[in-house]
Image: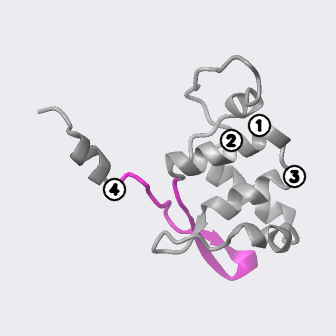
Amino acid sequence: MALSKAKILAAKDVKLSDPIPVPEWGDAVYIKTLSGAERDTFEEAYAEQKMKSFRVRFLVLTLADESGERLFDDSDVPALSGKSSIVINRLFEKAWSHNAFTNEAVEALGNDSPTAPSGSSTST
């Protein structure tokens, strides 16, 4: 039996990672899968302006609590940017991988020719 539009739109496909311990912050966080719209918005913003605070802006979109609600909003970028670069980078790598981003795809943003998505990720 083929999928219907209703079944596809009803599917719960935005997933949360397992808890990720952040001992420096005293507990754990979760990483959520971006929706198609969130990913498009992030990629478009990057392509238009090669955004500042790239890692932190990505974490603002993907760090979540146990119910999948974002922990931060866009106004929190400056505050989160002040946290340890070691923690930011560790969480960014996990969020990047969880959302199946590749360096090649992001580097191609803003180029005239679209690139086909590759199956590799930047880390695990």
Q: Position of residue 12 (x, y in %)?
A: 33, 56
Q: Of tags 4 and 1, which is closer to the observer?
A: 1
The residue type indicated by label 2 comes to: Glu
The answer to if 69 sits in the magenta stretch is no
Q: Earlier in the sequence, mark 4 or mark 1?
A: 4
Coloration of the structure image: one colour
- The residue tagged 1 is 47
**Given contact means CB atoms under 8 Å apart, are the residues at marks 4 and 2 in contact?**
no
- In depth, the one of 31 and 40 nearer the eye is 40
Viewed as shown, does residue 100 lie left or right of 24?
A: left
Query: Residue placed at 68% from the left, 30% from the top?
Result: 105
**Given contact means CB atoms under 8 Å apart, are the residues at marks 2 and 1 in contact?**
yes
Q: Position of residue 2 (x, y in %)?
A: 16, 32
Q: Is residue 85 above or below residue 13?
A: below
Query: Residue placed at 69% from the left, 17% from the top?
Result: 113
Query: What secondary structure is found at the residue carrying circle 1?
Result: helix
Q: Earlier in the sequence, mark 3 or mark 2?
A: 2
Query: What secondary structure is found at the residue carrying circle 2?
Result: helix
- The residue tagged 2 is 43
- In depth, the one of 58 and 10 nearer the eye is 10
Q: Which residues are magenta?
A: 13-33
> Which residue reaches farthest left?
1
- The residue tagged 3 is 52
